[in-house]
Image (tube, rainbow, N blue to C red):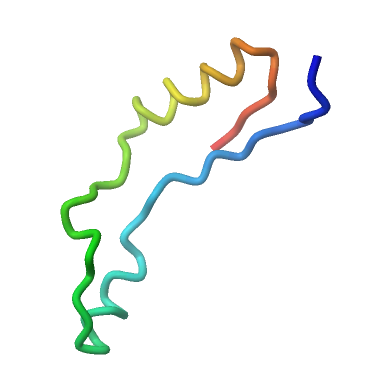
Amino acid sequence: MTNVEKVELLPYHELGKHKWEAMGEEYELNQISPPSADIMEQIKKVFIDMGINAIY
């Protein structure tokens, strides 16, 4: 039994990438890609299978 009511999954995104570049800074996460919808569904299913409400 858990006291967790809901888990909201927040996938990585690249929305701030241009800010780093505009400041002349190296964006160190260039090799990281946002997860696909399929991957997010797989992660969500892990929580659902444990009886925890999950959304993304």
Residue 30 x %, y %:
18, 59
Give the answer, above or below, for where 34 lies relative to 53.
below
Give the answer, above or below, for where 21 lies relative to 15.
below
Q: Residue 22 occupies which quadrant of the picture?
A: bottom left
The structure residue drawn at horizontal position 52% and vertical position 17%, both measured from the top left corner, is: 46
Q: Is residue 25 left or right of residue 44?
A: left
Q: Is residue 7 left or right of residue 41?
A: right
The structure residue drawn at horizontal position 35% and vertical position 27%, both measured from the top left corner, is: 39
The structure residue drawn at horizontal position 69% and vertical position 21%, both measured from the top left corner, is: 52
Residue 7 x %, y %:
65, 34
In the rendered view of the protein, which quadrant contains the N terminus? top right
Q: Work out which residue is located at the far top of the displayed protein and give it.
A: 49
Q: Work out which residue is located at the far bottom of the displayed protein and give it.
A: 23
Residue 8 x %, y %:
61, 39
Residue 12 x %, y %:
39, 50
Label count reads 0
